[in-house]
Amino acid sequence: MKKKFFLVIFVMTYVSTMSKAFPADTLYCTTKDKEIFNDYCNYITRWKNQPRDTIILKTAMFFLGTPYVAHTLEIEPEGLVVNLRELDCTTFVENVLTLTTTVLSGEMTFENYCSNLMHYRYRNDKINDYTDRLHYTSDWIYENQRKGLINNVTRKCGGKKLKLNLYIMSSNSDSYKQLLQNRVLKERIAVKEQEINKRKHYYIPTRKIDRRFRRIHTGDMVGFVTTIPGIDISHVGIVYKKGKTLTFIHASSKMEKVVVHEGTLSEYVKGTGRNTGIILAR
């Protein structure tokens, strides 16, 4: 009951309409989110002229200790959700890359950050409904590579072919309130799943991760390929080469906050019992 009550209060209190210059009609955020953004801008200033991978790493470290909270984007009607107070694995990576892009643009304003977040999160930089959001990680990488924001380097780093069979959303539509009793949106999701399945995909098998140490860079986005039927990636993070240790920074549901993983990247993959390897985007 407490969770439902919080969501209602959040929506009623913090929905705002942006100016016509902003691509989203509805923005969900709080004054605290804007304060965190301003704190970040002050924090990152000392590194703003450093290489991209340095900015990505320092941005990821800015969020260390931030609470892990899932499903923060699931607010209706669909709008741009800004939540820097609470992060899951996906929103952590998304915000790290969005903030880095904002820094490199030279225009470190909250409005520019929101526009960049929209650019990363939504297929065509606009929100008509739930299906405009990039739900599957493979599709998220594909679309953002098409936009020139990132580059899928999995194959370049020695990746092997990966066959995907995505269907979890369309086959379990009752688990998604936006798809529940909405046949049109469900059909759109199903069509998109089939489109993604037909693309060429690659992954680095678990046994080869450590052998690719030199090819994997700090600041790379890492996604963990899963054996769970119907989905592609079970978790994401930011690669961190700590000396000779290849690890990553992520929003951990187990630790309930953003942390630097204590073990290596390959140890994490082996330890889950449900992952077969990784994908990389730079």
Image (spheres, grey):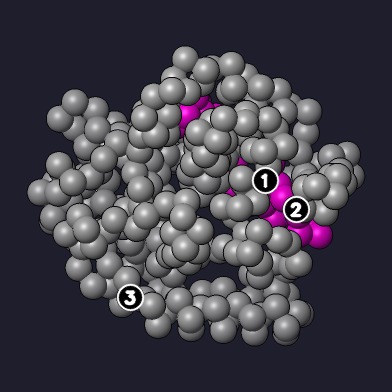
| Viewer-proximal residue among 167 and 203 | 203
What span is colored magenta in the figure? 59-82
Secondary structure beneath dot 3 equals: loop
Residue 232, above or below 109: below
Identify which amino acid the numbered label 1 is placed on.
Ser
- Residue 262 percent coordinates (x, y): 29, 31
Residue position for label 1: 115
Identify which amino acid the numbered label 2 is placed on.
Pro
Residue occupying the point 13% across, 55% down: 208
192 relative to 148 in the view: left or right? right
In magenta stretch: residue 72: yes
Residue position for label 2: 23
Distance between the alpha carbons at the discs numbered 3 and 1: 30 Å
Q: Earlier in the sequence, mark 3 or mark 1?
A: 1
Q: Residues within 10 Å of mark 1 (few under 14, many from 20)?
A: some
Distance between the alpha carbons at the discs numbered 1 and 2: 7 Å
Residue 267 seen in the figure? yes
| Viewer-proximal residue among 64 and 99 | 99
Task: Kindly indicate the quadrant of the structure image that contains residue 197.
Answer: bottom left
- Residue 253 percent coordinates (x, y): 48, 43
Residue occupying the point 35% across, 48% down: 282
Residue position for label 3: 200
